[in-house]
Image: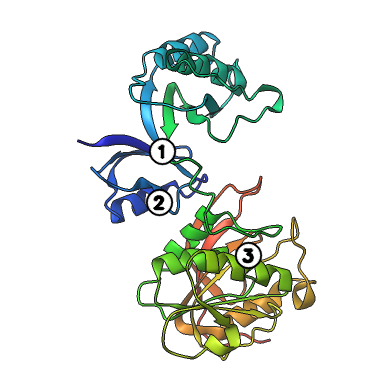
């Protein structure tokens, strides 16, 4: 028997989530919506292992005919009342709602209409999010999403959203959203790759996500900030990876490991052509200002990435200001992230020499 499940995602990477579901044989994809992938989960599949998804939910009801008027609230409440809640237990019920486009009701009205009906037969308290209230962490977590005239009522499968990685024991400002890092790693085609570099590694998210796809690869991370490297080291250790200095690891065979080192993104301490893949989220000034050789512009970073990248290598970068000089764009995925719309760009070195 298959279970109707929904994977939530950053807008723009829904197709990558669908691909991960298919390749991992987690189920059969039935549809893609705004920030959602609907699929029939395979029997016994561990859906909590999805890396490109923000969250995974079990669908309880699909409600058609949800208009823009306030009568939609009653329709949603009736649908919630009919949900089969057999066997569910918990300390309370909380609901998070979202919709695409304008409506004549608020997300809080949706949450309260559905939440009260879900909590009543369970004889549990309903915890509203109105006025900025935060439900208790152990409350049963439900979600309502509306796109067009169709609504989904679903229950979170795990005890916390999938994007809250267990390995994230330490963080810094501007740290990359893990499912976006996982999408970058997936686009990098890491099968059989020996060496992966992140020259602006921050808290290590991109390399830790790459390790999940390429456990035998050498993963080298550099950053201008020693505090970032301390966070990266702690996170990689929590993720089960061994560690060394990047200088010790670079160019050395043997067991896979993470290597971390302090370095300016404009002067990467690696040999020409020594890296198979580069994953990078350059500093773009909103949360983390560029420093050192990158303070004026990111030109030195891109010249160094091009230098250390092998002839048949790929760079996957989160870019905000167009494709960097010296590269050819192979694939582009536009995402919505922190109120911005950067592009995950898959880049190959342009033929010929680039003058410094």
Residue at which label 3 appears = 203
Of residues 25 and 17, the one nearer the viewer is 25
Say which element carries label 1: loop
* N-terminal label among 1 and 3: 1
Residue 324 position, x and y percent, is: 62, 70
Q: Quadrant of residue 155?
A: top left
Residue 273 position, x and y percent, is: 51, 88
Residue 105 position, x and y percent, is: 60, 16
Residue at which label 2 appears = 50
Between marks 3 and 2, how big is the CA–CA gap? 21 Å
Query: Residue at 64% of width from left, 58% of height from top?
Result: 175
Of residues 282 and 297, the one nearer the viewer is 282
Say which element carries label 3: loop
Residue at which label 1 appears = 157
**Residue 300 placement, left or right of 181:** right
Tag in front: 1 or 3: 1
Of residues 183 and 213, the one nearer the viewer is 213
* Mark 3 Cα-neighbour bin, 10 Å: few <14, some 14–19, many ≥20: many
Residue 296 position, x and y percent, is: 80, 72
Query: Residue at 48% of width from left, 71% of height from top?
Result: 241
Q: Are marks 1 and 3 in contact (CB under 8 Å)?
A: no
* N-terminal label among 3 and 2: 2
The answer to whether residue 187 shows anywhere in this view is: no
Between marks 1 and 3, how big is the CA–CA gap? 27 Å
Q: Are marks 2 and 1 in contact (CB under 8 Å)?
A: no
* N-terminal label among 2 and 1: 2
The answer to whether residue 331 shows anywhere in this view is: yes
Say which element carries label 2: loop
Between marks 2 and 1, how big is the CA–CA gap? 12 Å
């Amino acid at each position: 028997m298959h279970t109707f499940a929904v994977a939530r995602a950053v807008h723009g990477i829904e197709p990558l989530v669908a691909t991960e579901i298919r390749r991992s044989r987690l189920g059969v994809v039935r549809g893609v919506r705004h920030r959602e992938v609907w699929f029939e989960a395979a029997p016994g599949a561990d859906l909590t292992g999805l890396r490109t998804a923000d969250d995974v939910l079990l669908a309880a009801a699909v409600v058609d005919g949800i208009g823009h008027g306030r009568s939609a609230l009653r329709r949603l409440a009736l649908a919630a009342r009919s949900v089969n809640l057999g066997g569910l237990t918990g300390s309370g019920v909380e609901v998070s709602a979202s919709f695409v486009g304008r409506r004549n009701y608020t997300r809080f009205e949706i949450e309260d209409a559905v939440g009260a009906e879900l909590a009543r037969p369970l004889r549990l308290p309903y915890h509203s999010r109105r006025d900025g209230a935060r439900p208790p962490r152990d409350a049963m977590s439900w979600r309502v999403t509306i796109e067009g005239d169709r609504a989904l009522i679903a229950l979170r499968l795990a005890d916390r959203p999938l994007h809250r990685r267990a390995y994230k024991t330490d963080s810094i400002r501007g740290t990359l959203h893990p499912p976006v890092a996982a999408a970058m790693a997936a686009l990098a085609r890491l099968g059989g790759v020996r060496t992966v570099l992140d020259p602006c590694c921050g808290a290590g998210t991109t390399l830790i996500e790459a390790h999940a796809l390429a456990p035998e690869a050498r993963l080298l991370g550099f950053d201008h900030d020693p505090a970032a490297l301390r966070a990266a080291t702690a996170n990689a250790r929590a993720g089960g990876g061994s560690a060394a200095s990047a200088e010790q690891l670079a160019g050395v065979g043997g067991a896979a490991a993470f290597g971390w080192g302090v370095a300016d993104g404009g002067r990467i301490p690696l040999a020409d052509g020594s890296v198979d893949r580069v994953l990078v989220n350059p500093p773009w000034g909103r949360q983390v200002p560029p420093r050192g050789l990158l303070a004026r512009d990111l030109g030195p970073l891109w010249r160094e990435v091009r230098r250390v990248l092998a002839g048949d290598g790929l760079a996957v970068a989160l870019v905000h200001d167009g494709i960097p000089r010296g590269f050819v764009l192979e694939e582009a995925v536009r995402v919505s992230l922190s109120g911005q719309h950067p592009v995950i760009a898959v880049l190959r070195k342009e033929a010929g020499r680039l003058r410094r």
